[in-house]
Image (tube, rainbow, N blue to C red):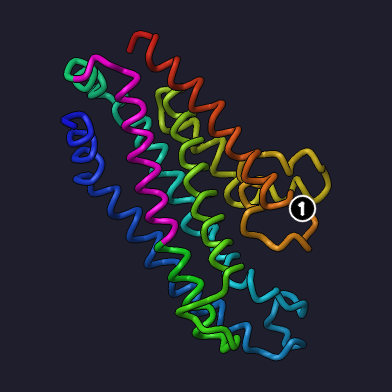
Amino acid sequence: MNLFRSESTKLFTNVTTWIIAGVAILATWPMALTNAGASNLPADDPRLFSSEPVPLEFQGFEMAGYGYVLVVVLAALWAGNEYGSGMQIRTTLAATPKRGRLFLTKSVLLAVSVGSIGFITMTGTIVITHMASNSGLGPWTLSPEIWKHLGGVTLAWTLTALIAFAIGSLARTAVLPLLLVTPLVIGIGDFLASFWSGAKYLPVTAGASMYSDPAAGTYLTPLTGGIVQGLWALVLLSTAYFAFSGRDV
């Protein structure tokens, strides 16, 4: 309990955590409002990128990428900050010699934090989308399919954050996860998947299968995508766990 309390205090008293959470939520919602306004334009309006309508159950989920980048930043900082110039990790390990418990506590706190940020951000985004676009769907009740996709995007954000955390823990820096994961989040994986089928199994692209329109042809099935991304997270977290538990600082 003391370990959980001390790590919670470390995470939730950090101003950066609240800035990232606030920006993820408050920047995505206005953009969702603007994006939903565009959907009310005629199908042949030149201001639209495409005249092909997005299926109702997927409308608004294209906004997931904005906050997605920020939760990767949060995960990378959570993994790498203690290895900075002050080497706070030495103090942490002196107070908590059971390294495995420390790693698991950090992972759980990150998962809960990112899951909460993701669910609040994307639920608000989808409600705003259907409220502003007059889609005919009740914005406060939505539909079972949309709630399923909201669960999928929340899980995808959480697993991606844990992957970034695992990479940062292995590298003992926030830089490497930012270099490796951020390009996937901003669309490199989806781009590669458009001409190379193997890219569908990259972690972020696989996770996107849980909330993206399969008609795009670049995604796995939702179940397969969730399993693939979950395996990426499990393997990397397990590797990072044993490395963290057994090596010197």
Provide the residue span drawn in magenta. Answer: 96-119
- Please tell me whether residue 35 belongs to the stretch shown in magenta: no
**Left or right: 120 with respect to 101?**
right
Question: 168 or 12, which is in the foreground?
Answer: 12
Label 1: few (<14), some (14–19) or many (≥20) C-alpha neighbours in 10 Å: many
Under circle 1, the secondary element is loop
Residue 200 in the image, given as x and y percentages of width and height: 73, 44
Q: Quadrant of the C terminus?
A: top left
Residue 3 in the image, given as x and y percentages of width and height: 21, 29
Question: 40 or 101, which is in the foreground?
Answer: 101
8 to 43, vertically: above or below = above
Residue where numbered disc 1 is placed = 218
Callout 1, which amino acid?
Thr
**Left or right: 103 with respect to 139?**
left
Question: 55 or 183, which is in the foreground?
Answer: 55
Residue 95 in the image, given as x and y percentages of width and height: 17, 19
- Occupied quadrant, residue 224: top right
The kind of secondary structure the magenta stretch mainly shows is helix
Q: Residue at x 40, y 59 (%)?
A: 24
**Left or right: 228 with respect to 178?**
right
- Please tell me whether residue 107 belongs to the stretch shown in magenta: yes
Q: Quadrant of the N terminus?
A: top left
